[in-house]
Image (tube, grey):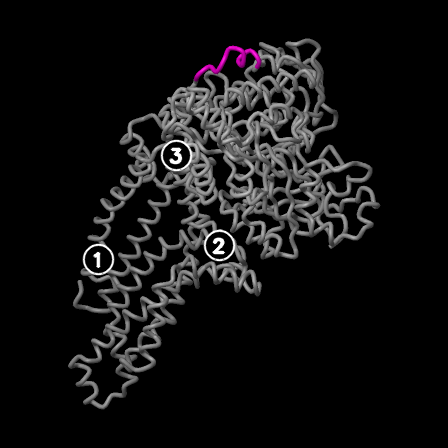
Amino acid sequence: MLTAARRAVIRRRLLQAVPVLVLATLVVFGLLKLMPGDIAITLAGENATDERINEIREMYGLNRPFLVQYGSWLAHALTGDLSKSLASGEAVATSIARSFPNTLLIVLLAMGVALVLGIPLGILAASKPDSLLDRVVTSIASLGIAVPSFWLAMILVAWFALEWGWFPATGSVALGQDPIKALHHAVLPALALAGGGLAEVSRQLRSSMVEYLSSSPVRTLHAKGLSSMSILWKHGLKNVGVNLLTVATLLFNRMLAATVVVEAVFAIPGMGNLIVNGALHRDLPVVQGVVFVMVLVVITVNLVADVLYTVLDPRIG
Amino acid sequence: MTDRHDDATLNLEGRTLNRREWLSLTGAGIVMAASSPGAFAQGTPVSKRGGVLRVSGSANPSSLDPATGGAGTDHTYLWTIFDTLVEWDYDTLKPKPGMAEWSYPDAKTMLINIKPGITFHDDTPCDAQAVKFNLDRGRQDQRSNIKADLSSIASVDVTGPLQVKLTLLRPDTALPAILSDRAGMMYSPKAVRDFGNDHDRKPVGAGPWKFVSWADNQKIVVTHYDKYWRSDRGFLGGIEFSIIPELATGLRSVVAGQNDMAYALPPRLKPIIEKSKDLNLVTGPTLYCLQLYFNLAKKPLDNVKVRQAINYAVDREAFVKLALSGMGEAATMQLPKSHWAYDPSVATLYPHDLNKARALLDEAGFKNGFELVVGGYTDQDSVRRGEIIMEQLAKVGIKLKFINGTVPEISGQFFGNEKKFDVLLSAWTGRPDPAMTYGLMYAKDAYFNAGRVEVSPELSTLLQESRASENIETRKQVFAKIQRIIMEQGLVAPLAFTLEFNAISKKVQGYKPNLLGKPKYEFLSMAG
């Protein structure tokens, strides 16, 4: 499976990852440092004195030059030590290890919903372009894109959690602890997140499928006597696979970011929650840790997508 | 719904209602209406032991070590694990004995007598050695945030197995109240030594519940300590805090039945609580005071007339109505009416009077008004408060220009070295002893005195005097003088005290609000 071409793709991507990782964390670090106010004031407590605040800056090395602080963080991060939260003393790696699965579960579930519903809808719409069915699907898709996820989340909570009590309104359960409960908690947030994704998958799929169906190879397939169904599902899907993969990859990465809002509505202790709290308290190690891991995840996902491209279309390499 | 929902209700027998009770009853009016008349004749209920209380916690703790933490939102967690040497009366915050009793043989000596039979959760005794260890740690440890609180102590000596003698640098009768706060929470010395800095996250105290786990921004779990030294409290089998900083979301978790209680809610959520038939709304006055801080070193706020004019121009009653949906107390000084040191004669200094405000501005040479730059916060409630004050002061020609940001950012810029903004619209969360509040805000070099100016030598002397006498009546008089100077000089413009505002499941019994507005769980029990 791992042909020379694919190995080259992986090697190239991994090399590109290094500058991306450094640049992303450096920019975030810089932005946080540019923001006024620092964590020393929070750490000094309610009965703060100027003296105590300075003492804390000294104690945590917050007085050191910007690049020295960043360099020290990076050196530790590269050896796998994401250091500790300044605000609470918990190891950042521990926080992330606990939060990431919560976020990942919601994103994967949302991706599942978006793809399982979006693909058939897109193909159905493409099979009869400009029909009533097509227009209904397209309208629903437009609505899905237009509706913000936080609004959808609130509506879902109001009805399915507070009114009917079918699903929990807040919180999450670790998958390892109780898989059924974990899924039960993840359903509403995933649905809120999936709305926009579903719309995007179906619309993109529809347009590439319509384009494919009007191409000359399809005419040949018709001439060979193949059924419309077979053309659509067997040949069509394979041909638009590359497009679909692109859409799915982008969607996954975007959903990872979009969970910030959904996590807030459902009080889910995930990555979004972690980075928001970290940023609010100027807790640099936490914010940096989350960015670091997120960048790694995005790079990995893109890498997997690149390899899959070569599987779907041997011309890519 | 059973008829014993709340000790506050049951304690009414044979007493007239004070303000706190009245408020907690209007708040819990639904409960009263639903209760049978027999509720008042039953006497103290026998609280059931066991059951787990699920609470929506409003913030991740800064630390679970009382000495190294710093956030005012930590106490509600800390109190479950740590008992304090001194406690206070829920209604007035008057100090009373906790794990220890105290006395002052002379002005510069304080004796602490620890009650026998108290053990930490690791079975080590809470004795004189342990108390000395804790006080010394608070005074000297590099990471301690309570050094300033204990700065009047020169030395701590063990004078008996259960007695500690504090030798003081100067008289300090605020110490009992200080020992009811972080400094009085005793941590097992063995655990501090064994765990090193990790002890911040593995607290071992002598409180009713012992620590089980803490996952940042997610959950804190405590379970009942079987050898707890008192049998008249600590009924719950355990408490689980889910940390949900977004308060409306926290309330949602209670409405949905996932949690039993949410606290420190904004009054605008009142209709949601009232709509839910499984919830009680419990309120009580607090020390939490919304106020305008002034930088006294900046023009034109260095002019007393300008500060007085602002105090006349703000309409506090209207502010309570608009900003707090009527659920608050107009603040005429920095203590609410129910506090033991409240002085009614100061309360009448600033009636809402636009003409007087204009006249004062005229005298100060600002007939045509001026502009002030105000620091504020970005959350919905803060912005609304800002708009109300902006509109009120505009009537006397004072234009406010708000610059909003997060709490650490804006307050840091105002109080820290940057000295940005003329005014800060923020809050004072209150302290167990008024001497702490005034010292922290008006001493010359105090952090919360943004201009770092000495207001008057008289105030400085009084601040010291307020810690000199042990007699509560004498102290009351000193505080009245201090409060009068603060208000006559217009060093601050207090606006309103917020109410403690909690949504509590009807399954939960025995909740009593306290003046600090931070929930304590010692008397709670679960019904059924």
For label 3, the crowd category at 10 Å Cα-Cα, with few meaning under 14, some 14 to 19 and many 20 or more, is many
- Identified by mark 1, the residue type is Arg
Residue at image location 56% in from the left, 34% down from the top: B288
Q: Which residue is mark 3?
A: B400
Q: Residues within 10 Å of mark 1 (few under 14, many from 20)?
A: some
Query: Residue B25: x percent and y percent?
Result: 70, 44
Camera-side residue of B439 and B519: B439
Q: Is residue B451 visible?
A: no
Q: Disc 1 or disc 2, which is closer to the eye?
A: 2
| Inter-mark Cα distance, 1 to 2 | 42 Å
Please give left or right for residue A253 compared with residue B256 in the image: left
Disc 1 designates what residue? A7
Q: Is residue B434 above or below residue B107?
A: below
On residue B28, the disc is none
Where does the magenta region start and end? B453-462
How many numbered marks appear? 3
Task: Using the numbered discs, state the Cα–Cα distance from disc 3 to disc 1 in whole angstroms.
Answer: 64 Å
Residue B454 counted in the magenta span: yes
Task: Check disc 3 and report its element: helix, strand or loop.
Answer: strand
Residue B436 visible at all: yes
The disc placed on residue A266 is: 2
User: SS for tag 2?
Assistant: helix
Which of discs 3 and 2 lies nearer the camera? The answer is: 3
In x, y percent, where is residue A149? 40, 59
Q: Specify few, some or many for label 2: CA neighbours under 10 Å numbering under 14, 14-19, or 20 or more.
A: many
Contact flag, marks 3 and 1 (Cβ < 8 Å): no
Q: Is residue A178 above or below residue B24?
A: below
The residue lying at 59 percent from left, 10 percent from top is B170
Dominant SS type (magenta): helix
In terms of sequence position, does the residue under pointer 1 or pointer 2 come before the other? 1
Mark 2 and mark 3 in contact (Cβ < 8 Å)? no
The chain identifier of the residue carrying mark 2 reads: A
